[in-house]
Image: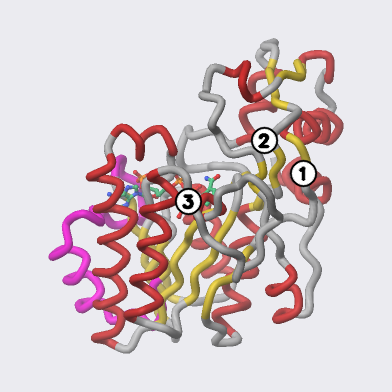
Amino acid sequence: MTEVLIIGASGLLGQHLLNEAEARRYSVTGTYYSEEVAGLERLDLTDFDAVETMIAGRRPDIVILPAAMTSIAECESNPVRAMLVNSEAPLVVAKACKSIGAKMALFSTVHVFSCESGPYAEDSKTSPVNILGRTRLEGENSVMETLPDSLAIRTCEDFGWNRLRSRENDVTSIVHRIRCGEEVNLPVDQWATPSYAPKVAEHVFDLLRNDESGIFHVATSSGLTRYEMGKRVCEAFGLDEERLEPTSLGNMGLGASLPRRLCLSTTKIEAKLGVSMNSFESCLEEMRIRH
Ligand SMILES: NC(=O)c1ccc[n+]([C@@H]2O[C@H](COP(=O)([O-])OP(=O)(O)OC[C@H]3O[C@@H](n4cnc5c(N)ncnc54)[C@H](OP(=O)(O)O)[C@@H]3O)[C@@H](O)[C@H]2O)c1
């Protein structure tokens, strides 16, 4: 039976990867970091000995690494830790995989690009403008150099139901805030091709099944402004659109230098798997049904 280790199975993507692996009847071990989750084991990526010991001891066939420092702000305020978690730890994982002959799948982000134009293809020029993007790119590069048949999956504004953590994403925060009667300010000048976590998990396991390697982008087929995303969410969940307030990024107090075009091209994965990426609307409909 194929043994899969998911480091960061308590995260949004990680929990959907775990569900997908179990649905495919793989034998799965998942890890958490900050808060205990029943059925998962604790692993701190910055404890390199523990990482090596877990991989050498379990000898999985596949190691999937969605765990990362994912917040732009946290990476800016703690660049040393961002380097440790996002750049150095993936290399430790890659070396441990190499020593036991395991396949590795690493997650990365649209922020390896400048996000000023786009949509970006896998071979578009990388040019990160923040510490998150720089540290993730370094992680990608060292993994691919060490273990060239690895997969590196870049996603963008991940969304889906988060059953294990209270962390919100673009979609769940709109649903919850409007249901609480709040107004939601959303920029009309920031575009994204959001990635739906359950679909990302499905496509990644299809790539692994086909023994693909290299970089792949996974996102929905829809390039929308954050305000348009909000409108689609209201339509899908029957929420009051009047609660949405169109604004500009500069007015959100987040810093005017935030990237404006978080858009990934998915032509490569569509050609490799012979599938079309789902639309944002169809993913919202699935979320509504699964609520
Ligand atoms: N979220 C997005 O919009 C987005 C966009 C583009 C790309 N991505 C990429 O997709 C991947 C998964 O993102 P996500 O949305 O699922 O993130 P998430 O929900 O924030 O999950 C992060 C995961 O990393 C774990 N983790 C954090 N620090 C760790 C450490 N020191 N040691 C071990 N585990 C640690 C967390 O564990 P605990 O929860 O137990 O602490 C959690 O399981 C990341 O590589 C991310 O860069 C995400």
Disc 2 and disc 3 in contact, CB within 8 angstroms:
no
Secondary element type, mark 3: loop
* Position in image of residue 289 (x %, y %): 77, 44
Disc 2 and disc 1 in contact, CB within 8 angstroms:
yes
Report crowding for label 2: few under 14, some 14 to 19, many 20 or more residues within 10 A (C-alpha): many
Residue occupying the far left of the picture: 49
Q: Give yes or no for residue 207 being in the magenta stretch.
A: no
Identify the residue shown where x is 45% and y is 72%. Answer: 105
Quarter of the C terminus within the rendering: top right
Camera-side residue: 235 or 286?
235
* Position in image of residue 27 (x %, y %): 43, 75
| Label 2 CB less than 8 angstroms from ligand 1 | no
Q: Which residue is mark 1?
A: 284
Identify the residue shown where x is 52% and y is 78%. Answer: 214
| Amino acid type, callout 3 | Pro
Lower sequence index among marks 2 and 1: 2
- Residues drawn in magenta: 34-63
Question: What label sits on residue 128 in the rendered view?
Answer: 3
Quarter of the N terminus within the rendering: bottom left
Q: Which residue is mark 2?
A: 171
Lower sequence index among marks 1 and 3: 3
CA gap between label 2 and label 3 equals 25 Å
Task: Decide: is 126 above or below 184.
Answer: below
Identify the residue shown where x is 36% and y is 84%. Answer: 102
Identify the residue shown where x is 31% and y is 40%. Answer: 35
Task: Decide: is 6 above or below 103.
Answer: above
